[in-house]
Image (cartoon, grey):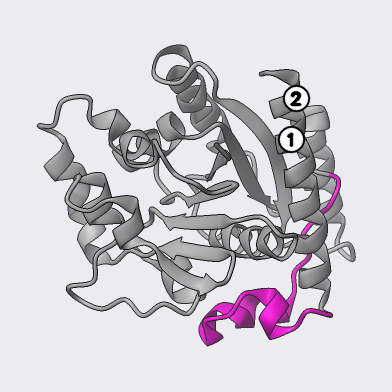
Amino acid sequence: MGKIIAILNQKGGVGKTTTAINVGAYLAKLGHHVLVLDLDPQGNATSGLGVEKQPGHIGTYQLMLGKAPLIDVVKPVEAKLHVVPTGAELAALEVELVEEPDRERALARALANHQYDYVLIDCPPALSLLTVNALTAADSVLIPVQAEYYALEGLSQLLNVVQMVRGGLNPQLELLGVVMTMYDPRTSLSTQVKDEVSQHFGDKVFDVVVPRNVRLAEAPSHGKHIFEHDRWSKGAKAYKHLAKEVHKRSQGSMTDGS
């Protein structure tokens, strides 16, 4: 069975959904079967991949409540790229799960027999029950960090949650890496933040940095990933390299048996 990667940062606007969509899209272009699972009630990964959020459509909500199997909620985007869409109803899921036994494993149960090479979970910008479900289901965590002031603020809390999940619910969970996003090499701030993140995370920081890029920002409004919207842009080049790094690291962790 393939790898499940939770893409997570409790701060909003750091490029989390952009990373899920574009890493997923390029992994699919490399020939892997990829599923992007939208676990954010805002549904940005859903619309960013060109799937309309319509009332009555089934998706993550029904999947996690056990009302529909994975095969029934998946929507094709391309031949090897699929998405589990979501909508506003997902916001009510935490309340509904509270009384459920083993509620932290709802997503893990739903994904137990998936047939994908990669499942990328676009997590909500909060350390919530939905996030804990993602971490319990995942093999690893990818953390996008924006190159701005207070970039590391809250990361210690996030890492504590990861450690708690690893200590009880999912001992195999590991940190796949930290990726710098919205990086502007013309500013000393971006360089300072990158250095600070590197000091904290060492070789867990991905080699590639994702630049600030207008074409990246535009793509979701067209319901397209960056390789459809402008495959020659700096943003496309960055996510191409990041996807290759993600694949290499994921295969390395498989080989290491960790």
180 or 100: nearer the eye?
100
Observer able to see residue 150: no
Instruction: Give the x, y percent position of residue 190.
Output: 80, 55
> Which quadrant would residue 202 be assigned to in this image?
top right
The residue drawn where x is 32% and y is 63% is 86
The residue drawn where x is 59% and y is 64% is 80
Instruction: Give the x, y percent position of residue 210.
Output: 77, 60
Element type where label 1 sits in the image: helix
Say whether residue 61 is left or right of residue 162.
left
Density class for disc 2 (Cα within 10 Å; few <14, some 14-19, many ≥20) is few
Instruction: Give the x, y percent position of residue 230.
Output: 75, 83
Q: Is residue 106 above or below residue 23?
A: above
Q: Are marks 2 and 1 in contact (CB under 8 Å)?
A: yes
Q: Is residue 160 above or below residue 217?
A: above
Q: State the residue lying farthest toward the left.
A: 99
Q: Which mark is residue 251?
A: 1
Element type where label 2 sits in the image: helix
Name the amino acid, label 1: Gln
Observer able to see residue 112: yes
> Which quadrant would residue 108 be assigned to in this image?
top left
Name the amino acid, label 2: Thr
Q: Is residue 132 above or below residue 170?
A: below
Residue position for label 2:
255
Q: Which residues are magenta?
A: 207-232
The residue drawn where x is 32% and y is 61% is 73
